[in-house]
Image (cartoon, grey):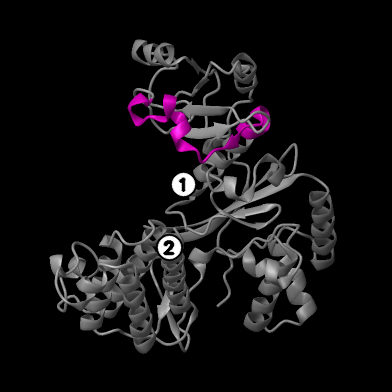
Amino acid sequence: MLNENVRPSSIDGIKRLATQIKKDKGLQHAAALDMAAKAASFENFTHARRSLSSQASLSASKNQLFITIYWRETKPYRQGRETLQVDLSKPLLKLCSKSELKLARGLWGRLVAPDHIVHDTVAQSQEFARGEICKAVRTLRFMEATGLRPSDDYLAAYPDRHHDNKLPDSDHATDWYDPKNGQFVLVDEPYSPAVVSERRAAWAQQNGWHLQASKWPGIYYPFSCSFFVATDASSGYDFAGLMKKIDSLAAPLVSKDWDGTSAPSHEVFASPMAKTPQDIRRARCKGTIIREASQTTTPYGAFGHERRKPRAKMPIPSHIEAGNMIKSVLASPHKPYSVNRRMDSVRSTLEDWMSNEIRRDELDGPEFFDVYYHDADETGPIAEASKTSEGLIRILEELKVKLSAHYPDCSPLRQQVGKIETSIKIISRYIEKRKAA
């Protein structure tokens, strides 16, 4: 059925609308194209093609970034897409790396093209979507002005790297570093006046750190939170220069000043740098995609966080035995600790699969959580095998066989088997090192 409210923003969108118009109104293709172009506020399809091609060429020549978030409201039901174009002083990946983007407030979406970030979680409202995009822009402007990059060294936020030295009354804190010299910088945005309290001033003096409130309203919640900056003073870092850059920032963008593009549907927005059909597919928000089962896998999970599991059920007794195997491996001291991270991931995944395979009345409450968590059995062949490194390898080999016997060969299963095989290799190297010592 034709949606009269659709306002396409790309040539592909106009063509898709034209196809719907052609079917619904029985028009010739050329007439349908012109009608679709008029829906996008152009005179005709030729005008639309020339204008959008010109805009694409101009956009590609600048350091532009597009940020897109899709949203869905329930009362009353409506949905849409918010996209904002941001002109940057340099290409996005010159401001920070892909991995650092995931640490930046508001920029944790997926980089689907060099000039486009898409959030895969569907926002709960149009206002929330706009707010998140504005937050991302504030983060970008902060990085542009300061040259700072997001840091994953969270312990650096504590003087002497000790948790007891945390900045008092800290809230909505983010970690940053200066790529020129590695200096760590802490940004703190609490709900408080922009004045350093006596308690926080004492913390700074005791630890030899700079701590100052900025005149700039901030990233997290401008005009409601204050923006404090802190860093170790012992290195001679130019803290005054940093604060001057931050204080000189323009007023932060907030949702009431929204000037982006709002679409009344989940029509996919493709940026100028999206050239191929694969680029267009990549630009789709995962939360808007209706997943279907294949011959070997089936989707599960919430919109935007969907995963796939084998399209089969492992009997509850087999889940219980698999859980006991994993718990015994995790509890055993006869292995390197790096095995734990992999096997903890496997048991979390298997518990998810089990929760999708059983009825509520089959396992409930403590019984359900006991399958993959809590203590392993203290007696029996598995408990005995876990007393040696060689025994742990036998347990893991048996776990591989059990999973492969109940689930079809598919990517989700291979991922879990791969983690088990890596754990076996780690334990094998551990055994060899002990023998060589």
Magenta stretch, residue numbers: 142-166
Q: Pick whichever, 89 or 425, lies toward us.
A: 425
The prevailing secondary structure element of the residues shown in magenta is helix
- CA–CA distance in space, label 2 to label 1: 50 Å
In which quarter of the view is residue 340 placed? bottom left
Secondary structure under badge 2? helix
Tell me which numbered mark, 2 or 1, is placed earlier along the sequence: 1
Left or right position of 247 against 404: right
- The type of residue carrying mark 2 is Tyr
Examine the rendered structure and indicate whether residue 400 appears above or below residue 88. Answer: below
Q: Pick whichever, 372 or 88, lies toward us.
A: 372
- The type of residue carrying mark 1 is Phe
- List the residue tagged with mark 1: 128
What percent of the width, then of the height, locates residue 130? 53, 45
Q: Pick whichever, 418 or 94, lies toward us.
A: 418
Examine the rendered structure and indicate whether residue 6 appears above or below residue 169. Answer: below
Q: Pick whichever, 172 or 370, lies toward us.
A: 370
Screen quadrant of the C terminus: bottom left
What percent of the width, then of the height, locates residue 101? 58, 46
Residue drawn at 76 percent across, 59 percent down: 42
Does the CB distance between marks 2 and 1 fall below 8 Å?
Answer: no
- List the residue tagged with mark 2: 430
What percent of the width, then of the height, locates residue 395? 31, 76
